Image: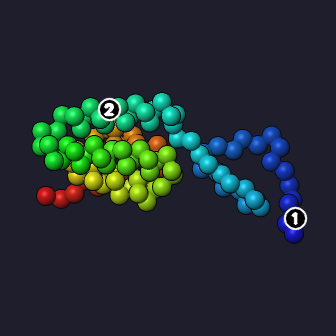
Amino acid sequence: MNNIIGSFNNSKLSGNVAVQSSNVHQTQNNGSNDDLQNAFKELEELIRKIQDETVKEQAEMNSEILREAIQNDDTTKTGKVLKFLVGALGAVQPIITIAQLAGIPVPNIPSP
């Protein structure tokens, strides 16, 4: 049995808040769905500009896998797919935005 002492009345909690309690699930929204959709549109535009057809096809597939991973809250898969896309495109703004909105670190640019 838990004993809760004190009150949070008139408190302003924001940002990365963690309060010990039972049966609590916290989520934090770092941006809107519109921001995410716009980042994916920008990513698709950059992918279309890739000259190497094989790299372009792989980037297109990875973009779709990334979208599904984010929808399923699969941060492990999201991180892996972002690494592939950084390898193909570099750390471009849409990838940075998608990583931030997904709440994961931006992958490093691979060394040549």
Q: Is residue 31 left or right of residue 9?
A: left
* First in sequence: mark 1 vs mark 2: 1
* Residue closest to the eye, 108 or 45: 45
Q: x and y percent of residue 74 in the render?
A: 48, 55
Q: Residue at x 22, y 45 (%)?
A: 57
Q: Residue at x 51, y 50 (%)?
A: 72
Q: Is residue 27 left or right of residue 10?
A: left
| Picture disc at residue 3 | 1
Colour mode of the rendering: rainbow
Q: Is residue 6 left or right of residue 57?
A: right
Q: Is residue 48 left or right of residue 52?
A: right
- Picture layout, residue 19 above or below residue 47: below
Q: Residues within 10 Å of mark 2 (few under 14, many from 20)?
A: some
- Picture layout, residue 66 above or below residue 1: above
Query: SS for tag 1?
Result: loop
Q: Amino acid at mark 1?
A: Asn
Q: Please say whether residue 87 is visible from this viewpoint.
A: yes
Q: Please say whether residue 91 is visible from this viewpoint.
A: no
Q: x and y percent of residue 67 in the render?
A: 41, 44
Query: SS for tag 2?
Result: helix
Quadrant housing the N terminus: bottom right
Q: x and y percent of residue 94 in the render?
A: 34, 38
Residue corresponding to mark 2: 42
Measure how far apart labels 1 and 2 are at the Cα level: 51 Å
Q: Quadrant of residue 64?
A: top left
Quadrant housing the C terminus: bottom left
